[in-house]
Image: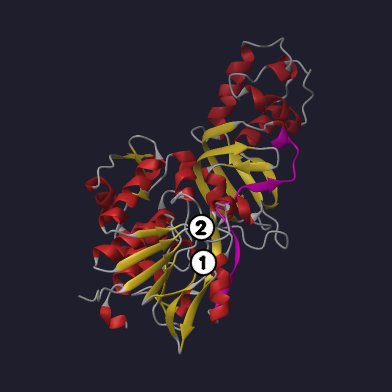
């Protein structure tokens, strides 16, 4: 008997590719995944520092509000496969999950391999084939997909493109998918870094390299001192500047760095207002009257921050605490509440967690994830010009677009 199942190729074996392959097979398709790495889910394995923030436990409205770029495009996909659906998907496949601060969902084991293995098992259930080689191109005739060159020609009814962006190229995201689209005449938005560390002009960051701050207030201010981003949480100083969850999320808001000036303001003591903080400093100083100012801040600041902080106050480090003036104390309070750094630029796109840009959403049917130009070509995940903040939202985009693409690719009416 002739096999009449639709033949589907999925290019890319990451989060979106694996979800798409499993769902297409579940819908009766004959599926082959092309993954250039020797293993699948390579980038997924390193997300969340190897813990994998798989999704955010929230409703659809909240999810959409965390997508700054083309949020309306995502409505059908995330409504069809909601954050709670994604949680249920992994839990029914034996992955115990937990919810942490900010409604971030992780495996109880803190192992991203649990997520990869669940997706791989999903594919295995549908007898998905894996070909570990690099695809050379997508073939199309008369506005319809005909197959792949990998390097020899293989005929397929539909192709799901899930090659990711250009961040973390060591995981295989080197922009192949963009090149396939260019050859097919599909409109692309230039790729840029999103959720990326920031380089800072001030040398104090390098002096505090490796220091992590938790539960601090963070703001990004434009050249008019207007707040363009505000958050509360964790950041880390590096040799080039800053990184960490609040900084990565902030980077998505800083447009046209270079032509525009941005300043980062850190509130080291967000739970204390200035008057309470001043009284706290007075109390600390009262027991340290004969100590040098540079040796008087251990109760207020982590040790690695003290020397840079003292320098930023402009107060001589050897000045005795008992001679600190009210005006100088005001400077200390202000710096604790509003420590400022000037953004130089983002780190290179290869260091970004997510690539902004990709296939122009104007050329994709948001109800099916199919190209409006090439019938039978579907898109899933980071290759689409949609990106979100940190907290599990970007994996949610990958999973939901992949599922929608797979369901529609597997339908016979697409022939």
* 359 on left or right of 204: left
Tag 1 or tag 2, which sits nearer the N-term?
2
Q: Is residue 24 left or right of residue 376?
A: left
Which mark is on residue 312? none
Residue 155, x across and y down, in percent: 41, 76
Q: Nearer the viewer, residue 67 or 194?
A: 194
Quadrant of the rendered image containing residue 161: bottom left
Quadrant of the rendered structure where residue 95 is? top left
Q: Is residue 307 magenta?
A: no
Residue at horizontal 28 percent and vertical 39 percent from the top: 96
- Residue on which disc 2 sits: 36
Tell which residue pokes out farthest to the bottom in this image.
Answer: 142
Front in this rendered view, residue 83 or 227:
83
In the rendered image, the quadrant that contains the C terminus is bottom left
At x 51% / y 53%, what residue is drawn? 37
Q: Quadrant of residue 409?
A: bottom left
**Mark 1 surroundings: few (<14), some (14-19) or many (≥20) residues within 10 A:** many
| Quarter of the figure that contains the N terminus | bottom left
Instruction: Give residue 83's position: percent from left, percent from top.
Output: 31, 55
| SS assignment at label 2 | loop
The magenta stretch spans which residues? 187-206
Dot 2, crowdedness within 10 Å: few (<14), some or many (≥20)? some
| Position in image of residue 100 (x %, y %) | 36, 39
Residue identifier under label 1 = 135
Q: Do callouts 2 and 1 mark residues in contact (Cβ within 8 Å)? A: yes
Residue occupying the point 29% across, 62% down = 23
Q: Is residue 228 above or below residue 187?
A: above
* Nearer the observer, 167 or 181: 181
Which residue is painted at 58% across and 76% down in the image? 182
């Amino acid at each position: 008997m002739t096999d009449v199942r639709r033949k589907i190729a999925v290019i890319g074996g990451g989060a979106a590719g694996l979800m798409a392959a499993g769902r297409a097979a579940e819908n009766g398709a004959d599926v082959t995944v092309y993954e250039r790495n020797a293993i699948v889910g390579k980038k997924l394995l390193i997300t969340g520092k190897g813990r994998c923030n798989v999704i955010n436990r929230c409703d659809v409205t909240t999810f959409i509000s965390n997508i700054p770029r083309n949020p309306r495009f995502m409505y059908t996909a995330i409504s069809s496969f909601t954050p709670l659906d994604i949680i249920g998907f992994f839990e029914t496949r034996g992955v115990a999950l937990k919810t942490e601060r900010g409604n971030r969902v992780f495996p109880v084991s803190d192992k991203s391999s649990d997520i990869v293995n669940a997706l791989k098992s999903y594919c295995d259930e549908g007898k998905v084939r894996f070909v570990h080689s690099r695809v050379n191109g997508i073939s199309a005739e008369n506005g319809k997909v005909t197959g792949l060159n990998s390097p020899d020609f293989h005929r397929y009814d539909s192709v799901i493109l899930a090659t990711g962006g250009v961040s973390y190229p060591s995981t295989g995201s080197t922009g192949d998918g963009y090149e396939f689209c260019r050859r097919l005449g599909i409109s692309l938005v230039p790729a840029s870094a999103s959720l990326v560390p920031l380089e800072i002009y001030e040398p104090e960051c390098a002096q505090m390299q490796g220091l992590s701050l938790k539960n601090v207030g963070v703001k990004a201010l434009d050249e008019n001192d207007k707040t363009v981003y505000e958050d509360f949480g964790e950041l880390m100083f590096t040799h080039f500047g800053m990184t960490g969850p609040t900084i990565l999320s902030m980077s998505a808001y800083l447009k046209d760095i270079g032509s525009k000036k941005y300043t980062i303001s850190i509130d080291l003591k967000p739970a204390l207002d200035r008057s309470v903080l001043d009284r706290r400093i007075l109390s600390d100083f009262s027991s340290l009257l004969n100590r040098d100012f540079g040796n008087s801040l251990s109760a207020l600041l982590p040790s690695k921050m003290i020397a840079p902080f003292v320098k930023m106050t402009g107060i001589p480090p050897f000045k005795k605490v008992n001679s600190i003036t009210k005006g100088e104390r005001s400077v200390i309070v202000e710096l604790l509440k509003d420590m400022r750094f000037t953004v130089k630029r983002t780190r290179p796109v290869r260091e970004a967690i997510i690539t902004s840009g990709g296939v122009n959403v104007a050329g994709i049917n948001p109800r099916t994830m199919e190209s409006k130009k090439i019938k039978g070509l579907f898109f899933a995940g980071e290759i689409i010009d949609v990106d979100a903040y940190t907290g599990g939202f970007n994996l949610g985009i990958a999973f939901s677009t992949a599922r929608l693409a797979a369901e529609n690719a597997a339908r016979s009416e697409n022939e």
